[in-house]
Amino acid sequence: MIRAITNTLALGLGALVGNQMSLRIACHRAPYPMPHQLAALLEHPWRLKYRHPAEDVGLYGCGPGMNVLDLGCGTGFYTEALAQRVGEEGVVHAVDLQRPLLSQAEARLFAAGLSQRVRFHWCGAYQLPLADASIDLAVVIATLPQIPNKQLALAELARVLKRDGRLVVSEEMPDPAYTPPPVVRRWLQEAGFRFGGQSGAWFCYHQIYFNQRS
C-alpha cells in the first residue's frame, strides 16, 4: 500500500514537472502575452510576498515630475505605485496589448483617485504612441520575454527614452516565460543599453539600464 501511494505521488510529481517544462519551452519558442483570463494571478497573495510595487518603484528611481512608461501594465499593479511617485506634475503612460487588462488598470487608477496622472494606451510594444526622447523612466515588469520581437521592442524603448533615461526590466521565476538575468542582460546590451546594476535574487530580480542612443 505504501509503495503504491509512493509510486502514485512520484508519477503525479513527474507529470507536474514535465508539464511545467513543456510550458516553459513553448513560451520561449513562441512567446506570447499572459492571457488576460489569468489576471487574478498578478495580485495573488503568493505574488505579493515578493512583489512590492511601492518599494520597487523607489528603487527604480521614479520621482516627482517624471514622465514614466509602464510597458505591459496589466491590471495596473505597478502603475498605481508609479502614479503616486510622480506626483501631480508627472505622467505615467500605461501600455498594454490586451484591452481587458487595460480596462482593469483604468478602473484601479480611477478608484485610487490617480487617473488624471495616467495616460492609458491600448497597443503593443513595437509602435508606442509617444514622442522621441520623452520618457525619463520605463519599467517592463514580467513582460519582455513574452514579446516575440524583443530587439524591435527594445529599439522602440530606446526611441522614446531620453538620453541616459532609465529602463528597468524585472523578471520572476513563477512566470513560464521567465528568463535568467544573464540572458536578459545580453539582450539589452545588444540593443545598446548600458547596464546599471541588479538587485533581488534569481527568483525575482530587477535590472536597471541606461539609454545610450541619442
Image (cartoon, grey):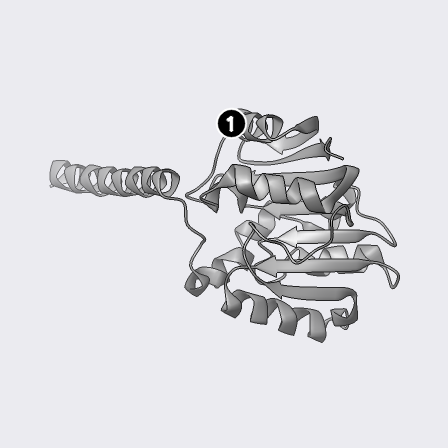
Q: Name the one closer to the observer, 16 or 133.
A: 133
Q: Name the one closer to the observer, 106 or 199.
A: 106
Quarter of the image for residue 82 reads: bottom right
* Residue drawn where x is 74% and y is 41% of the image: 60
Quarter of the image for residue 3 reads: top left
Q: Name the one closer to the observer, 190 or 82.
A: 190
Q: Name the one closer to the observer, 6 or 31.
A: 31
Q: On the picture, is 119 further left or further right than 37? A: right
Quarter of the image for residue 78 reads: bottom right
Which x, y percent locates residue 166?
Answer: 74, 39
* Residue drawn where x is 79% and y is 59% of the image: 91
Q: On the picture, is 23 further left or further right than 192? A: left
Which x, y percent locates residue 199?
Answer: 67, 31
Whether residue 80 is visible, yes or no, is yes
Query: For the residue carrying disc 1, how many other residues have a C-alpha within 10 Å: few (<14), some (14-19), or many (20+)?
Result: few
Which x, y percent locates residue 189?
Answer: 61, 26
Q: Which element carries disc 1, helix, strand or loop?
A: helix
Q: Which residue is mark 1?
A: 183
* Residue drawn where x is 47% and y is 38% of the image: 178
Where the C terminus falls, by quadrant? top right
Which x, y percent locates residue 180?
Answer: 50, 30
The answer to whether residue 35 is above or below residue 26 is below
The answer to whether residue 178 is above or below residue 84 is above
